[in-house]
Amino acid sequence: MKFIKNHLMFIFPLMAILLGIEFYLVFDRTTDSYEKGLKEGYSMLVVTKKPMELSALKALNKHISTSEKIKRENIVSEIAKGVSKSSSKEILAALPYFYNVGLDSYLHTSGLEKIKMDLEADTNIKKVETFGSSYSSAYRLFSFIKFTLKLFIVFMGVVSLFLIIKQMEIWKYAHKQRMQVMEIFGAPLMLRSGVLFKVATIDAFIATILTSAIFLYVKFQWAANSGIDIMVQNQEELFRLTDMAILLGSALLLVIIAVYSVVFTSKGVQE
Amino acid sequence: MSNVISASHLTLAYDNGAKEIIKDASFSIKKGEFVFITGPSGSGKSTLLKALYGQLKPSEGNLVVGGLDLATARQSKLQELRTHMGIIFQDYKLVNEWTVAKNVVLPLMIAGYSVDVQNTQAHRLLKHVKLAEHADKYPLELSGGEQQRVGVARALAKNPVVILADEPTGNLDDYSSNVIWDLMENACQQLETTVLVVTHKIPTIFSLPYRHLIIESKGVYEVH
């Protein structure tokens, strides 16, 4: 019972840290694709006096990635219904050129203002409409959710670290006598810390497997049946095989740090 | 005979040299000698022993053990030196979660001997210290005297060049004390092991010729 308790007292905080890491990875990937969707769905309207190529727009600001010319004939046909053909031609000649301009990333509203200023500095550009207010509210909500979740992950990580430090104190108490006696008789570091490494490495594997199992369940059971659009659409992003390697690597790194801290603070003969 | 231990103008101190325990001491000990180190409480007997197994670096002077200058030796060299030493403590320093047999063969385990050799040696050593029937017990199941005999068996496990013993019979009854003195005398006589024993009192029944060093007023002196 005590043996299981000792293992669980290391496995649980380790799992909490691994869950935090995996949450971060999943959240980063899902928000990336969500961000991509927002970015692709967004474009600003640029009105120019003369036709303007994409390269010319790109030269004004590096965030501009696409430009789509809006057919002026369509505008004329919309606004000049019932007008004679010659008048339509005159309207068309007087009409400026319209472009839907896309960006390379999802920017803060201040970034949009900067693009607007850069574009309006060109004498050929008559008007730039960024649709800033609707963009801004979506951006703020998105940023807030992102920040809150990251804060939660950091908090979870800090609390778990404290629990691991507590467990290290217990390890130190449990293994100090053996390690000190072995040190007196000339045992090298690896031999002295062997038992502790073995125990901690097993715990690292168990924590990784359990964390992976939770996310595999979320991916194949919960997300698939949840009916939540963002979950269903991003099901593939929820857990990848490479995540398991990242989790195991992180767990082993924590184990190495924890074990060596215990070994180095247990040096010297107890009087 | 060659010196196994030699100290020259040795100063041992704690707190980065602020608290001097032994100052400007010079002495040497030859292979196969049995040496008692006595002195009042707090005179620095255990501190000297600590320095001899490399747990405390000399503040000044030289301390050479088995050809290794302990003032400048690297940790790996100190580790290697300790594998040629048998160290006995007043509080035994046995690993309580290991069986008696496993405690005894610790030096062999560190040296990388096979499990078969370890088992054979454990049986031989425990028979030697009259504890063969306790091989599978744990240290806390034994009396103080028995635990110290396990400690002596462990110290003898790898036929060490030097045995360092810190008050080995301090807490023991006469029977256990006599068994321990016999074991150390035998090691010195038959294996030419150098034995240094820190003690308050030299045992009255002691058949071997021995040297007596006394630590007083921070100095180490020979008693003739």
Image (cartoon, rainbow, N blue to C red):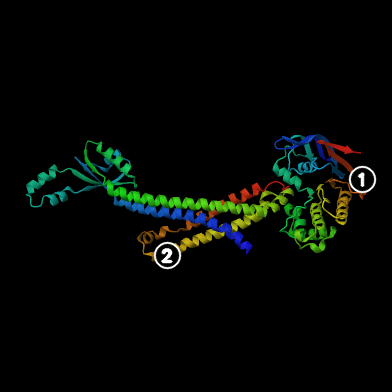
Residue A134 percent coordinates (x, y): 28, 49
Residue drawn where x is 83% and y is 50% of the image: B170
Q: Which residue is mark 2?
A: A222
Residue B82 percent coordinates (x, y): 75, 47
Q: Are marks 2 and 1 on the same chain?
A: no
Locate residue B189 relative to residue A93 in the image: left or right.
Answer: right
Residue contact between numbered discs 2 and 1, judged by CB atoms under 8 Å: no
A211 over A39 or under it: above or below: below
Q: Does the image show residue B18? A: yes
Q: Does the image show residue B1? A: no
Q: Chain of mark 2?
A: A
Q: Amino acid at mark 1?
A: Pro
Q: Amino acid at mark 2?
A: Trp
Locate residue B41 relative to residue A208 in the image: left or right.
Answer: right
Residue B24 percent coordinates (x, y): 80, 33
Q: Which residue is mark 1?
A: B209
